[in-house]
Amino acid sequence: QDDTYNQLFCFCLFFVFVLFFPVCCGAVTVKVTPKVEADGGTTAKLPCTFSGTALSNFVVDWHIDTGNQRTRVAYRTISGERMSDPGTPLVGRVTLEEDLTLTIKSVKPSDPNKYYCQVTAGKDGSGEGETILEVFVAPQTPVIQKPSQAISVDQEVSSEVCISSSKNGFPSPRIIWFKDNQPLPEIKDRKEKTYMLLTSVKETTGLYSIKNTLHMRPTKADKDSIFHCTVEYSLAGEKNKNIQKKSEPMKIDLNYPFEKVMFNLFNPTVVKEGDNVTLKCETDGNPQPEFEFSKDEKNLDGADGSLILKNVKRTDSGTYKCSTYDYDAEVFEKSNTTVLTVNYIDEMSVFPPGNQTIDLGKQVQWQCKTKASKNHTVLWKKGDVVLSQDGTLSIASAAYKDAGEYVCFGGVPEVPGLTAQASVNLTVKGKPEIDTPHAGEVAKEGDEVTLKCSANGFPKPQFTWSTSGKESLPVEENKVVGSLTIKATPEIIKSGVKCEVSNEFGKDSKDFPVAVKRANSAEGRAFSLLLLLSSLLLSGLFVVQTL
Ligand SMILES: *[C@@H]1O[C@H](CO)[C@@H](O)[C@H](O)[C@H]1NC(C)=O
Ligand SMILES: *[C@@H]1O[C@H](CO)[C@@H](O)[C@H](O)[C@H]1NC(C)=O
Ligand SMILES: *[C@@H]1O[C@H](CO)[C@@H](O)[C@H](O)[C@H]1NC(C)=O
Ligand SMILES: *[C@@H]1O[C@H](CO)[C@@H](O)[C@H](O)[C@H]1NC(C)=O
Ligand SMILES: *[C@@H]1O[C@H](CO)[C@@H](O)[C@H](O)[C@H]1NC(C)=O
């Protein structure tokens, strides 16, 4: 009993000794920051202060842990000189400040360590403080790599689905896989269906490059799954923990068998004669198998799942078949069909056909019709004017203005671009008619004037002018315009000029007056007055002479 008591007592004493001796019995107390964090490349500051002595001839040593021993990196001598030690991993980057702070420039992945600040002050004894330095370097954004070949679904073993790698981090970062934005638990057991293989390589720079390979047994459902990963790391400072950098998303290339064959019209959806048509065949598997095409038991040549029919005719309408072979299935051949309908419109037939010539005032009528694969419209137009929408065009009493070209348009509204057209020409024949004449005007007697006599009539009428001059016969639309250029003699000003037109059906004539433009300017009046005066003077002279 006593023995145990003694043992316990000694034990306690030992603990008290070990734990409190440096504090309670050394007069010097050293204060440091227990943990300092720094990002690679920056400057780390390890402060050190002390109390418990007033002596000025104290010595300070900063040490680091190097395996089993400590190595001094910087110190202060008894006389107050501050120096750094040669041959340490910190040489050239370390300085001891006046306030005894140890400053390390361009922090490296090899710098994390225990740093001891030891103060010795003669008779007052010594004290020591320990600081742990931690260094952080952000790794690069992870990169995902796919295997070079597609993976088959429903395999007995797991396949390497993708590799993610992230370079140059410190300390070694972590890669987390995500499938459809859900994190995958980190499983390292290779007996599981899904597991990850991790490697971490320490580069010569001291930084870590890590790789995480995802192994899975994908199913068909995974064809649309999106995978990505993040690299998780920390930087100096409370706020900068567990930062994540995200990779690009990725889909895996899967091979899976098909169940269905789909065969559809690809382009265009409504087909008309003359179109180029593509029929597309595909399965719900991956990759696509080879296909065969046929119509009415006749084989057709396709390529890459497409059957291309150029410049189709109505006879190309019908049921097309696409087949393929599934060697693993019980039913060997799988196929599907699609129906092609080629729309058409026949030529427009007009009755009576060709050009029509009718007498002025008579009735004329045409019928226009056609056949098409779907409901169609028939329009009669002259120029831009729609004259009829039911195929019948009638003109009760033909006038000269009705002459010209009439076009009958056929169209299938349900099939854009499916149209046909035909035209007829109407000629209206009869005796010529002269339009209301425009009077000719001259500034003064003797000037030249051009008269225009415009006439309808078919056949083209002959022109006769009552006076001869320079004649021409231009044709304007349905009309013939006879023009005459003459000198306005007093005779012509007095009685005008007559235009006469005639053809085999009769004739017409109109008088074209020619007038001197009334001079109402001051100059004109003065001129008239002068004329009057001179004639008076002339008659006076005449009287004198006869006397
Ligand atoms: C044939 O195609 C249609 C439509 O593309 C599809 O619904 C059907 O399942 C297919 N049939 C077969 C046997 O693959
Ligand atoms: C159909 O294809 C031919 C040749 O490829 C081309 O010359 C023609 O213009 C095409 N027809 C139509 C309606 O696209
Ligand atoms: C119909 O008349 C036009 C002139 O109006 C002529 O160009 C065309 O050749 C004629 N067509 C026939 C078939 O006679
Ligand atoms: C085609 O025309 C007939 C008779 O005019 C009409 O009853 C039918 O609804 C039309 N069909 C379409 C698709 O417009
Ligand atoms: C009608 O005349 C025009 C020229 O004026 C011609 O191009 C067209 O072919 C003619 N129509 C018929 C049916 O002759």
Image (cartoon, rainbow, N blue to C red):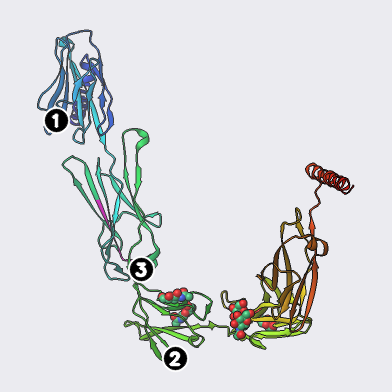
Which disc is residue 296 wearing?
A: 2
Would you say residue 261 sits in the magenta stretch? no
Q: Is residue 411 visible?
A: no
The range drawn in magenta is 211-219
Depth check, mark 2 against mark 3: the one in front is 2
Q: Earlier in the sequence, mark 2 or mark 3?
A: 3
Q: Earlier in the sequence, mark 1 or mark 2?
A: 1
Q: x, y (%) of residue 340?
A: 50, 83
| Residue at the far left in the pictured view | 87
User: Residue at horizontal 79%, vertical 55%?
Assistant: 516
Crowding around mark 3 (Cα neighbors within 10 Å: few <14, some 14 to 19, many 20+) is some
Q: CA distance from mark 3 to mark 1?
A: 54 Å
User: Residue at horizontal 76%, vertical 71%?
Assistant: 466
Decide: is 93 above or below 509: above
Q: CA distance from mark 2 to mark 3?
A: 39 Å
Q: Nearer the viewer, residue 19 or 4?
A: 19
Q: x, y (%) of residue 194?
A: 31, 61
Which quadrant of the frame does ligand 3 lie within?
Answer: bottom right
From the image, tell me which residue sits under label 1: 89
From the image, tell me which residue sits under label 3: 219
Depth check, mark 1 against mark 2: the one in front is 2
Crowding around mark 2 (Cα neighbors within 10 Å: few <14, some 14 to 19, many 20+) is few
Q: CA distance from mark 1 to mark 2?
A: 87 Å
Residue 501, picture quadrant: bottom right
Which quarter shows the N terminus? top left
Identify the amino acid type marked 3. Answer: Thr
Is disc 1 placed on a helix, strand or loop? loop
Q: Earlier in the sequence, mark 3 or mark 1?
A: 1
Identify the amino acid type marked 1. Answer: Pro
